[in-house]
């Protein structure tokens, strides 16, 4: 399988303070990588680096083998990377309808109207939002807004989708429901994804592979089984222990009620 | 701690403290603002009107003049909104070269009376001007000149509001768009719609100020409705009763402007105007960066050209050496009245602004009353102050600096209310609730918690209010007591017959005073750390 995202020895410093240090990771075609870490570990910086809002101080970021930023320079601007993102606060544009939110990126990419309409209808339908297409984000429930944000990312058919703790603010029931939805559509569409979270259960439920960020460094990456076999740090050991107590991989949320 | 904070006021008294204080301050605020606005109507109803005056509104003349003035104000608004929005986006969010300097230079004219800029343009494009001739003078002394000068003078209001609004847009909304679209599309499809209410607010303010403007149209001999009312208060058209009557059609205009602002603000929090500027990357203009930068710098030259022209005129004609002889007490009058008014505005603003920030009962009404005075045509307000205070028993106020101070407080009270509302709404209400839980009553919370936390905002508000008072011409010119005229009125009255270099020099004194006050504010705010 080919690499979709590749970070090679990436260091990010802001005002002389290192946020990320010597990060090397790859995400292959169709793979879902979960990046796990506590608050302040550099997760959001990593997402912004891949999106192109930050340039690595040293090292290189590649998308589909093409260098997009290197050694302090952004070589390809965010809009030309063909990525999509779901932020923690969703960032739905409040003055656009649900349909308008989905259509914005398609129009920006020059997709023809017939194709746009078909793709929007398809994704609204898949996420159960067909009846909500003319509503504004402010009038939607929390779960509906979450689905719109996911649809807005998926409708672009992006090279990869980045999720920056999209479910962090949800209650347990809604989180479980959306994790199931998300897992279903990512697997079905075989979408490459980077899913950033501080919750090991979310990571285990969705990801093929996990990478743990601590203090701006990746301290371990691999599968859940590899983590269980040989945790690299006490933090990783704690994560694995949490998963043992609260297994969630195949029974999302059942333990949390 | 609880007993210490609460021991001097009984629980029963504490319960009443808040409504009593807000009610008392609100009553004073309403009296200062509303009575002058109602006074012309009361004067007409009370019989000050002579039958022959009543006929003036029965002829088409005043109504046509009113429509003409409204159209001119609309044209000024269009120019200011177009220019201000464009500059707001370019300087507020893009990587235009030198945008920090440009931001300061473009915002500055907002704090000057427009007729000073008009004087500057006259120095350039008047018949004898630096680059003037018959054609430029014809353009200047015409509706076109009126619209161009006021459009340029008021564009900074829209520009500043747009830039503040853009800084306040959730960065996530912009970044989500940047992932899929180019900067131009992000600016036009995401950012501009997000700040549409802010631009709308700017348009309302510009329209209100343009309609109120007296200095520029009178200087350019452009006929406008407020000038017609003004002429009834002095000179050969002297007829105060007719002035009261002519002021009446301005009441619904003020009400309409207030209604438009309320509609824009409906359901929106008071912190829409910013103070939440978070650092983020500017939108890259790419190959348009240099053309856009050149255009912005060219507009900067246009913004400072009138002031440079005034400086040149004053220097060449020896105006600076004559300042002493001509300025009289006007600078002192300006500073004294502006200082007194700004102090009162901050006191009123602290109570009303806090009430608005915390959505306390009655706060929306007080905010609306303050705004009504600001958007009401200045001439209506001035006529009202005359009708209210020009009587033997209140001569001690009307004949002294007090009438100028009262006028400033009423007209610019909203500046204090709005800026302190925005500042106080930035701090969590839990800080006050914690004090309340420890037994602190309303006044103690206000004095010991809220105001000390917002010391910077109080000083900034004082300076802003002082600058608004200093720049006022259109209100004070209607009722200034003899010998107590502020500097703007002094320049305005001299402009018709005084020596040109001296008028230019006095105008520059005003510019300098304004710059010093703003710089003091900038240094104060910049040098006080993050608090």
Image (cartoon, rainbow, N blue to C red):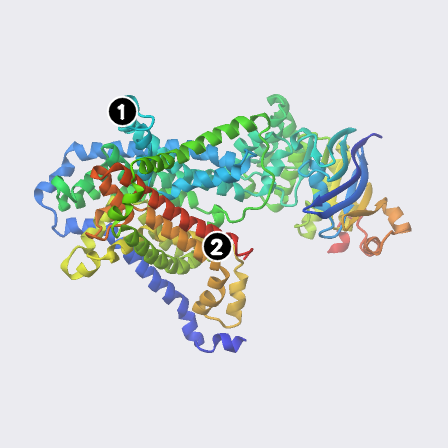
Residue where numbered disc 2 is placed:
B524
**Residue located at (71% from left, 51% from top):** A40
Residue A96 shows up from this direction: no
User: In which quadrant of the rendered view does residue A79 lie?
Assistant: top right
Label whose residue precedes the other's in the sequence (1 or 2): 1
Count of numbered labels shown in the rendering: 2
Residue B400 shows up from this direction: yes
What x and y, as percent, mark residue A58?
76, 39
Horizontal arrangement in the rendering, residue B16 relative to residue B292 (left or right) = left
Horizontal arrangement in the rendering, residue B111 relative to residue A117 (left or right) = left
User: Could you tell me how far apart the alpha carbons at marks 1 and 2 are, in whole angstroms?
Assistant: 45 Å
Horizontal arrangement in the rendering, residue A199 relative to residue B508 (left or right) = right
Subunit of label 1: B
What x and y, as percent, mark residue B36?
24, 52
Q: Is residue B374 above or below residue B438?
A: above
Q: Is residue B139 above or below residue B446?
A: above
Residue where numbered disc 1 is placed:
B138
**Element type at mark 2:** helix
Q: Crowding near pointer 2: few (<14 within 10 Å), some, many (20+)?
A: some
Q: Quick one: B240 or B506, which is closer to the camera?
A: B506
Q: Quick one: A116 or B379, which is closer to the camera?
A: B379
Q: Quadrant of the N terminus of chain A?
A: top right
User: In which quadrant of the rendered view does residue A91 lie?
Assistant: top right
Subunit of label 2: B
Q: Is residue B18 above or below residue A61?
A: below
**Element type at mark 1:** helix
């Amino acid at each position: 399988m080919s690499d979709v995202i590749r970070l090679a020895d990436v260091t990010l410093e802001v005002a002389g303070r290192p946020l990320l240090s010597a990060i090397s990771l790859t995400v292959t075609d169709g793979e879902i990588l979960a990046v796990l870490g506590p608050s302040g570990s550099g997760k959001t910086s990593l997402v912004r680096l891949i999106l192109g809002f930050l340039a690595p101080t040293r090292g290189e970021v590649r998308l589909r083998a093409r260098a997009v930023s290197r050694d302090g320079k952004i070589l390809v601007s965010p809009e030309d990377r063909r990525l999509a993102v779901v932020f923690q606060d969703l960032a739905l544009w409040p003055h656009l309808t649900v349909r308008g939110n989905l259509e914005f990126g398609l129009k920006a990419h020059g997709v023809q109207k017939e194709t746009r309409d078909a793709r929007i209808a398809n994704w609204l339908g898949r996420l159960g939002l067909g009846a909500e297409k003319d509503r504004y984000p402010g009038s939607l429930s929390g779960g509906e807004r979450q689905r719109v944000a996911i649809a807005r990312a998926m409708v672009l058919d992006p090279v990869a989708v980045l999720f920056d703790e999209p479910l962090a603010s949800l209650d347990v029931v809604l989180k479980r429901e959306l994790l199931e939805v998300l897992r279903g559509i990512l697997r079905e569409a075989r979408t490459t994804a980077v899913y950033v979270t501080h919750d090991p259960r979310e990571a285990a439920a969705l990801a093929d592979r996990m990478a743990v960020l601590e203090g701006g460094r990746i301290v371990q990456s691999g599968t859940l089984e590899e983590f269980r076999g040989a945790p690299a740090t006490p933090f990783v050991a704690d994560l694995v222990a949490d998963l043992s107590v609260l297994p969630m991989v195949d029974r999302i949320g059942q333990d949390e009620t | 701690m609880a007993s210490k904070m609460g021991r001097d006021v009984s629980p029963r008294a504490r319960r009443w403290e808040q409504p009593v204080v807000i009610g008392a301050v609100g009553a004073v605020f309403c009296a200062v603002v509303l009575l002058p606005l109602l006074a012309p109507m009361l004067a007409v109803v009370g019989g000050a009107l002579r039958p022959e005056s009543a006929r003036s509104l029965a002829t088409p003349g005043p109504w046509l003049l009113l429509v003409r003035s409204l159209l001119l104000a609309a044209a000024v608004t269009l120019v200011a909104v177009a220019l201000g929005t464009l500059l707001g986006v370019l300087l507020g969010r893009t990587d235009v070269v030198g945008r920090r300097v440009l931001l300061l230079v473009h915002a500055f004219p907002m704090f000057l009376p427009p007729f000073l800029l008009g004087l500057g343009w006259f120095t350039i494009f008047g018949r004898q001007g630096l680059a003037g001739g018959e054609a430029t003078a014809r353009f200047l002394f015409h509706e076109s000149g009126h619209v161009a000068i006021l459009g340029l003078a008021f564009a900074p209001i829209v520009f500043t509001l747009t830039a503040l609004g853009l800084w306040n847009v959730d960065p996530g909304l912009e970044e989500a768009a940047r992932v899929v679209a180019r900067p131009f599309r992000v600016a036009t499809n995401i950012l501009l719609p997000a700040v549409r209410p802010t631009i709308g607010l700017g348009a309302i303010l510009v329209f209100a100020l343009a309609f109120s403007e007296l200095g520029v149209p009178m200087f350019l001999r452009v006929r406008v409705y407020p000038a017609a009312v003004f002429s009834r208060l002095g000179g050969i058209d002297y007829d105060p009763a007719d002035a009261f009557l002519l002021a009446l059609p301005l009441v619904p205009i003020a009400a309409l402007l207030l209604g438009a602002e309320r509609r824009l603000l409906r359901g929106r929090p008071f912190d829409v105007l910013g103070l939440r500027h978070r650092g983020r990357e500017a939108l890259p203009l790419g190959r348009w960066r240099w053309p856009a930068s050149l255009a912005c710098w060219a507009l900067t030259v246009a913004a400072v050209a009138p002031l440079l022209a005034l400086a040149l005129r004053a220097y060449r004609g020896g105006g600076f050496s004559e300042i002493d002889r001509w300025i009289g007490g006007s600078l002192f009058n300006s500073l004294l009245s502006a200082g007194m008014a700004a102090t009162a505005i901050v006191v009123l603003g602290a109570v009303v602004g806090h009430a608005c920030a915390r959505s306390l009962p009655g706060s929306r009404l007080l905010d609306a009353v303050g705004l009504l005075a600001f958007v009401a045509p200045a001439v209506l307000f001035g006529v009202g102050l005359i009708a209210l205070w020009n009587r033997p028993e209140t001569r001690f106020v009307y004949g002294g600096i007090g009438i100028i101070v009262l006028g400033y407080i009423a007209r610019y009270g909203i500046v204090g209310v709005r800026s302190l509302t925005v500042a106080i709404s930035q701090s969590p209400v839990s800080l006050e609730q914690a004090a309340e839980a420890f037994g602190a009553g309303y006044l103690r919370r206000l004095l010991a918690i809220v105001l000390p936390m917002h010391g910077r905002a109080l000083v900034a508000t004082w300076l802003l209010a002082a600058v608004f008072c200093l720049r006022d011409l259109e209100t004070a010119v209607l009722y200034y007591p003899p010998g107590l005229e502020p500097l703007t009125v002094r320049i305005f009255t001299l402009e018709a017959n005084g020596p040109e270099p001296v008028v230019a020099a006095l105008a520059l004194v005003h510019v300098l005073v304004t710059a010093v006050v703003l710089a003091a504010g900038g240094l104060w705010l910049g040098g006080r750390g993050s608090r």
